[in-house]
Amino acid sequence: MLCTRCRIRTAVTDDGLCTFCSGTRPPLPADMTPRATGPGGWGAGDWPRSPVGLSWAVTALLGTVIATDLVAIGSGLHLRSAWQSFAAADHTAVQLGRVQSADHLHDTLADVQPAVFLVTGILFILWFHRTRRNAELFDPSVQKMGPGWAVGGWFVPVANLWFPYRVADGIWTGSAPIGPEGGRTAVPRALLNFWWALWVATLLCDQITARMQDTAGEPEQQAHALAVVAAADALEIVAAVLAILFVRALTRMQVERAVQPLVPMPPVPGAHR
């Protein structure tokens, strides 16, 4: 039977809760217990490990994603203009040549975008997994899903619209610095929620634009599809900006938390809302 609270792990208690949700989880394995600390509170060869270097790499690559999207928007609008001129000029040879030239440029950029996105995604997941492992030490009591889901959750169809958010929510809560009274401080989730909402929106928009481009035949349909693609790229730019802000904010939280005691803090009332 699955846990009645998280619906992920197997229930082990009489009231239907798993070891995570019931608070009866066994101690951390030896390979995650910090035995030595280096400057800034980061482990010397053990966990926690600094996510700062990865965060800068992810930020730089997200900036590259934004740059390629901006160029793709310009290229797409140029191709859209060529299709509109082609339709208005009764399909003249001159306009056809303009369409072919613009289409070649647009296709080249369309090949570059996935490559940049793939490299960015790999680095982001590495950073995401590291922050999840750190959060396991900072406060394991608020982690809703295991560290493996910080990687695997992105590749499960349909579930990838929700599982990574659950992981991120646990990381965000567990990485909150300890307040003056010794309890975990409540950090607003607006940035986390907006980033995830925009990310899901970009995934859905990609599906819509792909179908529109596949079914577009007439010049007018091509022009309309390209306008939607440009709007989708603009939405992806906003999502990338929010992703940068999320990465920087969570990294700062973990840097501050790393110099504080590695003991579970009692949850703040309403912290999961």
Image (cartoon, rainbow, N blue to C red):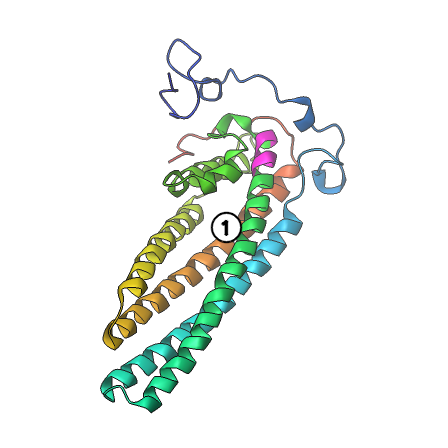
Q: Which residue in the structure is indicated by mark 1?
A: 246
The answer to whether 122 is drawn above or below residue 34 in the figure is below
Seen in the image, is 157 located left or right of residue 30? left
Say which amino acid is labelled 1: Phe
Report the span colored magenta: 132-137
Q: Residue at x 43, y 40 (%)?
A: 165
Name the main secondary structure of what is drawn in magenta.
helix
Q: Quadrant of residue 162?
A: top left
**Residue 185, position as x, y percentages in the image:** 51, 36
Indicate whether residue 220 is drawn in magenta.
no
The local crowd at label 1, few if under 14, some if 14 to 19, many if 20 or more residues have their Cα within 10 Å, is: many
Indicate the quadrant containing the C terminus: top left, top right, bottom left or bottom right. top left
The answer to whether 89 is drawn above or below residue 46 in the figure is below
Seen in the image, is 180 located left or right of residue 106? right
Q: Residue at x 26, y 77 (%)?
A: 219
Q: Residue at x 38, y 85 (%)?
A: 98
The answer to whether 175 is drawn above or below residue 67 in the figure is above
Q: Residue at x 34, y 82 (%)?
A: 82
Report if residue 102 is visible in the image: yes
**Residue 163, position as x, y percentages in the image:** 42, 37
